[in-house]
Image (tube, coloured by chain):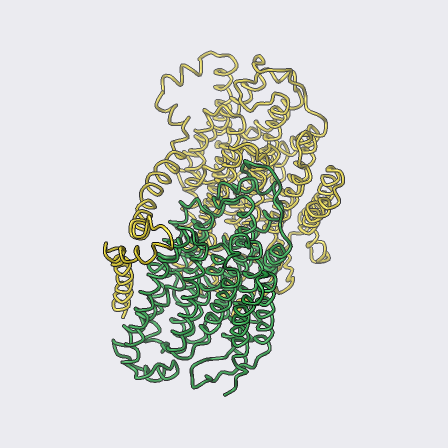
Chain colours: A green, B yellow
Amino acid sequence: MNWMYILPEIIIAASALAIIIADLISRKPVIITTIAIVGIAASLIAACTSTVTFEPVFDGMLFIDGWSRLLKVLLLVVAGSVVIASTDYHARLKHSWAEFHALVLFSLLGMMLMPSAGNLISAFIAIEITSISFFVMVGMLKTPLSSEASLKMMLTGGIAAAVMLYGMAFIFGSTGSTSLAEIALSSQPDFSSGLLLGALLLLAGLLFEAGAVPFHMWLPDAYEGAPTPVTMYLSAGSKLAGIAVIARVFSMGLNNPGGLGADWGMAVAVISALTMTLGNVLALQQSNIKRLLAYSGIVHTGYMLIAVATIGLGGQVSGDEKLFFYMASFALAEIAVFTAVIVITRQIGSDRIEDLAGLARRSPLLFAIMSIGIFSLMGLPLTAGFMAKLFIFTSAVDNGLLWLMIIAVLNTVISAYYYLRIIRVMWLGKPSDGSALSLPKAPGLISIFSALGILLLGIAPYLLLKLAENIIFIP
Amino acid sequence: MNDIAEIVFWMIPGLPLAAFVIVFIGLRVLRVNDWLGALLSIIATTASFALSVWLGIRLLIQPQTRLIEGFSWFSAGTGMNVDVGLLVNPLTVIMLVVVSTISLMVQIYSVGYMRRDGGINRYFSFISLFTFAMLSLVMSNNLLIMFMSWEMVGLCSYLLIGFWFHRPEAAKAAKKAFFITRIGDFGFLAALLILFNATGTFDIEGIHQAAAAGIVSATAITWAALGIFFGAVGKSAQFPLHTWLPDAMEGPTPVSALIHAATMVAAGVFLVARMYPLFEQSESALTVVAVVGGITALLAATIALVMWDIKKVLAYSTISQLGYMMLGIGLGGVWVGIFHLFTHAFFKALLFMGAGSVSHSTHTFDMREMGGLGRKMPITCITFVAGALSLSGLWPLAGFFSKEEILGSALESQPILFGIVLATVFLTAFYMFRVVFLTFGGKYKGKGKPHESPLVMLAPMLIMAVLAISAGWLNADGTIGSLLGEESNHSWTTGIFGVFTHSLTWVSLLLAAAGIMLAWAMYSKNWFSPKKVSSRFTSVNSLLLHKYWFDELYENIIGSRLLNNGLFRFFEIADERIIDGAVNGLASLTSYTGSMARRVQNGKLQNYLLIFITGVAIIALVAIIIN
């Protein structure tokens, strides 16, 4: 066994433990934050330089290939941003500062393992590590709203886990194995109806993490009630890990072209259409920025599921790099917007959209960051969001999903309505209090970087796309 | 044009872009005088204008198409290669001349009009950005870049409509304009993706070749053409997406002249012209274009009859004239529509400048508070009347020649549409001269002392007046027709005087004259009072005053009742009842376990489970059906 394969994960786990121990020795928040950042940075270096292989490792439990490496890097960047952004949230989290950071790292550990899963059992363990950490983090504010959100998330999460396990049991029953490689072998070319049922139950359980309709119910409450850095983490982290694990499990284990792949591919396509439409419709009425971003995140889950559907319908390797591009551009936009939201809401003491009025005059820089992020979510040209949508929509048409593309494009129109409302309020609204807002250094740095990243990827998408293509497909 | 260096072509959109970057970023940081930004912006546009006119002259000497390959922007996966290049054909050059001329004139005019406002740097940087986006939209050889420029002009329009953001109506109008044009963009983007899937390229020439070679199925062509046209309907404010343009008049008047009269709104017409080879392959798509154009022309002209706000009249007039252009393309081919676009840009921008000049001295747009301005503002009055005569289509002004071609094409093919166009000719002359008599005739009814505008505003108006009079003569020997049309050279107008050999000319001139006379009788001589006329036709009058209730239909019935309080509310309640109702009132962590037990007891937990399992069942069902 070569432990070097999971060096990034080992570093993260060690840092999490170090934080718990450090908390016993000194209660200085700087120390905790430093350990977390150093751990994430070290893990990032390890993830970038570690060896990858197309063969499963640890008895088929994990895949350490290009896809898992890309996702690890992305999730590490997201987690690092969350840690840095949360320095601005210290006042509200100071009583559980160390626990919060330890949980950020533990859930990161789970999320990093999710896209690497080579076995249903390792996938399940990774998902549960992530979910349970999040249940606690969401409830960390200990306000009624926060506790309620945590409870809702835990209840639905429990059901999701049960459904998922049930599905895994069916898959094991029909194929005699939990290893993705062996499931793939024994499901060719014919498959039993038990396997199909199992696959769909598994899909339902996995869609919970990604926040797709009709498994989205926990999400708006969790986003609203959770501490904002946790909301950011849920959106830019666990959502992406959830989609990545679907792409992994289904494209590796349950993807025989023409048969099972077409079935779940079509199911995902239908869910994707429902997800983006319902998410948009519900987003229209929101007056709380965090809740609105929750629904906006549901819509983006829908867009990403288009790419997952094309993987099922188009065979093994049709759109992984495009899906990754979408994830990266979405993560950048969420980091920019949520960091700005953290900074703004702390200073204005409200997370209602109306109270963002006049932001353009109170802080032009924060306004610019928010606008770039929102324009990217909206899919306006010259932002990464536009390119990401273009890639995914073209691959939908190429895989015979013309109807889905049309629904998706229609949805981008609907979404413009509520995104524009935020822009309008920030730019044209009258502030009740005209005092200037400040942007502290650390959160300022990451939000400016991600805003610039959005523009860079909007102008030069090939930088990331080529890189992703090379990492995924060339050993 | 083949001997011209490539850099010249790149400079045309490049210079305004450079001006934008310098003005927006450079001057903000340095915080120098605001007017330096205006100067830089004007210099850059002047250079683009000079280059465009030079290209135009070269084109007249020797018509050619020049393709500049440019560079490869990016490639994605297998088969998606996007190149940034320029396609410079006669259509492009005509648009270049229009855009750069109007942009230059409007910027000079703005120096006078906007001088009392703050944010001059911001204003001129947005105008420069708009000019860049519009020029690259026109020059791009690639549908994807065109779409991106298309969105960018929309964004600039949003920024400029909302320029006076302290006015709530301006903010609302800006959002409405952006959102409604985005509804149209849905069609454009979908068509783009369909065409890419069918032909494997975004290159405009490549798409046309593939379509001509029969690679693309007829259904795909029709749907793609309709999608593109839907995009044009949004941008060019055609029925039924026309409601945003009148509201967009909340922006500064020079912006209305540039964006909402001459260039951006004409981009839809240009798009249809650019993709015309595609439309040519689909009879039904062309018919749709013509019919929608005809309906829009008549509908908007009737609303213009009753508006009291001078800019609103001009806005509806613009919508109506854009309908003319669509009709011209649909029935007569590219050159008929583009020729009208060309002349319309000059006289309509002139009319907006005139309206701006009037409001600059009276501080209102309401014509009931004007009157008698003819003697106080003689130059504004003369130029405005020249524009109005051109718009009404009086010989030998520019509007006459281009409108005559549209009438001719309609007469040849569609008797019903021909009737509509004729009716619109009469209505146009009437509403324009209603404005003229209300504004410049009679006695002054407003406050303060009106005065003539400064020279910096009058000079561009005078230049535009010359163009509004003479631009049509360019086609006196069929020049524009032969530049743009391949076989459609049966021009109705042969020579400036030759037009009188055809009886159609007499009919249309009579109708226009009748419209002017009627306006004169009603609003100058008061032989019969407008009030009596409107009270006799109360229902018609109220229908028109409410603009056929389109805003109410969209906002109250569809937007508010059907969607917000109907469908969306239903989803929301369904969502809330099950989720929020489930755990509402849950207090704090202390009652954590207790409440969890209660939850189980009162059955809400089953709700969660129910939805989950229903979802799973639906997924299974879908899979089984597809299987």
Q: Nearer the viewer, residue A221 or B273?
A: A221
In this rendered view, identify the residue nearer to me: B624 or A215. A215
Q: Residue at x 69, y 49 (%)?
A: B21
Find residue A11 and report its image quarter.
bottom right
Q: Residue A63 at what x, y percent from top left? A: 47, 80
Q: Can residue B398 be spotted in the picture?
A: no
In the displayed structure, does residue B79 sit left or right of residue B578?
A: right
Q: Residue at x 42, y 53 (%)?
A: A146
Q: Quadrant of the C terminus of chain B?
A: bottom left
List x then y, in percent, for residue A15: 55, 71
Quarter of the N terminus of chain B within the rendering: bottom right
**Residue B95 seen in the current view:** yes
Q: Give residue A377's position: percent from left, percent from top.
A: 50, 54
Q: Quadrant of residue B108?
A: top right
Whether residue A182 sits left or right of residue A6 in the image: it is: left
Counting every numbered tag in the picture gives 0
Q: Is residue B581 above or below residue B354?
A: below
- Residue found farthest to the bottom: A1
Above or below, comparing residue A228 to residue B472 in the picture: below
Q: Work out whether residue B598 or residue B43 is closer to the camera in this orientation and state it.
A: B598
Query: Residue A212, position in %: x, y?
Result: 37, 60
A187 to A27, vertically: above or below:
below
